[in-house]
């Protein structure tokens, strides 16, 4: 069996560059070397390159190839693990579609849509058992009258960049006085901002992937933040949050949630692995949708690797299945 050349694509143009590098390192360590020859390709605004350890060799973007020691290497597959733009918002996906190179993530359309929180909520609206927090979408060029927001939505409110792939620029606001500063912080990250009612409850995140042609829902992780909410700092600071995998959910809850997540995955036409964040409303069984992550973190401590291990699955096999679809 010949090995496939895999371009493991990391980096990107956001503050999550280093997180992406850690994801790539873990994926590379868990891909079967007998099946795959891995080339980690780093993407920055200045260059796309392969680091040999001695030099940076630029990728030829005309055909996404690499010339090493006079030999031209073409890739059988692109494994994208860039968080935020251009790997999570459909840009790289569109490029690979044009070149005919298969990849592990959702397609360009789904990637672009799921980066927009307001669009995503509109598309999943109406799925049985799924609720979404009441919200308003604001645009930088419009007026942002705090009184209008306060009249339409109940405090406390979450203010967040609409297109943020990460948790940067988020605030929780308890009264009208806090709105202007929170809006300014979010507009610093994006031209569109989502203001939504805070749902009090327990927060969960759960991976879902199509493996060997079947949709597999991984065990849930409960996220208990020691900060007021699970923001960028809570996500990446040791001890700022607890992650419990598998989460303490009844069989009935697990089954109901898995059905809702499967429906979201199908409705959004997801491919490969995604992670869906949600809240169970306090004192009820009501499921509230937060967002879909189409290139979720893959460092060894990240949620999906935790969930794969909790399911008793082999991480090497899991990543391998994302690359090698079943024979028709």
Image (tube, helix red, strand yellow):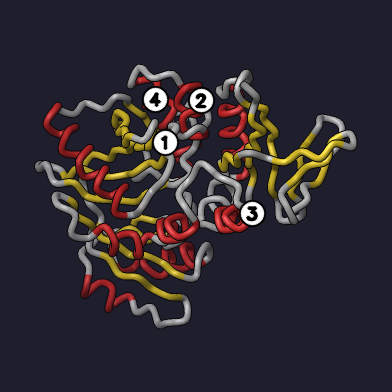
Q: Specify which label sits upstream in the sequence, 2 or 4.
A: 2
- Per the image, label 3 sits on a secondary structure element best described as helix
The residue wearing badge 2 is: 300
Answer yes or no: is residue 8 visible.
yes
> Which quadrant is home to the N terminus?
top right
- Residue 69 in the image, given as x and y percentages of width and height: 89, 34
Alpha carbon separation for disc pair 3 and 2: 31 Å
Q: Nearer the viewer, residue 37 or 129?
A: 37
Q: Which residue is identified by label 4?
A: 308
The mark that comes first in sequence, 2 or 1, is: 2
Viewer-nearest of discs 4 and 1: 1
> Residue 328, labelled with which disc?
1
Going from N to C along the chain, the mark reached first, 4 or 1, is 4
Horizontally, residue 180 falls left or right of residue 263, namely right
- Residue at 57% over, 24% down: 31
Picture quadrant of residue 152 = bottom left
Chain-order first, disc 3 or disc 2: 3
Q: How far from the left and from the top, in percent, is residue 68?
A: 84, 36
Secondary structure of residue under mark 1: loop
**Coordinates of residue 109 in the picture (x, y in percent):** 45, 60
How crowded is the residue under tag 1: few (<14 C-alpha within 10 Å), some, or many (20+)?
few
Q: Is residue 302 above or below residue 191?
A: above
- Residue that appears at 29% across and 62% down: 123
Residue at the (56%, 58%) spot, across then down: 94
Q: Earlier in the sequence, mark 1 or mark 3?
A: 3
First reached walking from the N terminus: tag 3 or tag 4:
3
Name the element at disc 2.
loop
């Amino acid at each position: 069996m010949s090995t496939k050349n895999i371009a493991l694509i990391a980096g990107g143009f956001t503050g999550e560059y280093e997180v992406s590098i850690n994801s790539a390192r873990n994926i590379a360590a868990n891909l079967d070397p007998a099946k795959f020859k891995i080339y980690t390709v780093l993407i920055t605004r200045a260059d796309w390159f392969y680091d040999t350890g001695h030099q940076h060799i630029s990728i030829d973007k005309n055909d996404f190839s690499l010339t090493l020691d006079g030999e031209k290497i073409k890739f059988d597959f692109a494994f994208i693990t860039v968080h935020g733009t251009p790997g999570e918002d459909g840009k790289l996906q569109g490029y690979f579609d044009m070149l005919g190179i298969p990849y592990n993530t959702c397609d360009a359309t789904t990637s672009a849509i799921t980066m927009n929180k307001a669009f995503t909520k509109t598309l999943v609206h109406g799925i049985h058992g799924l609720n979404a927090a009441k919200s308003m979408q604001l645009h930088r060029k419009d007026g942002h009258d705090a009184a209008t927001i306060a009249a339409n939505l109940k405090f406390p409110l979450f203010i967040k960049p609409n297109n943020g792939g990460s948790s940067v620029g988020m605030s929780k606001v308890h009264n009208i006085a806090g709105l202007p500063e929170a809006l300014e912080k979010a507009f610093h990250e994006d031209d569109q901002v989502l203001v939504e009612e805070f749902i009090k409850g327990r927060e969960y995140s759960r991976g879902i992937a199509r493996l060997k042609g079947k949709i597999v829902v991984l065990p849930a992780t409960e996220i208990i933040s020691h900060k007021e909410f699970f923001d960028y700092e809570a996500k990446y600071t040791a001890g700022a949050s607890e992650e419990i995998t598998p989460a303490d959910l009844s069989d009935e809850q697990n089954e109901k949630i898995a059905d809702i997540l499967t429906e979201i995955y199908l409705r959004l036409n997801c491919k490969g692995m995604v992670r869906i964040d949600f809240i169970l409303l306090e004192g009820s069984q009501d499921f509230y949708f937060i967002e879909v992550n189409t290139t979720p973190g893959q460092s060894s401590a990240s949620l999906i690797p935790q969930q794969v291990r909790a399911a008793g699955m082999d991480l090497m096999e899991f990543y391998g299945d994302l690359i090698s679809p079943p024979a028709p």
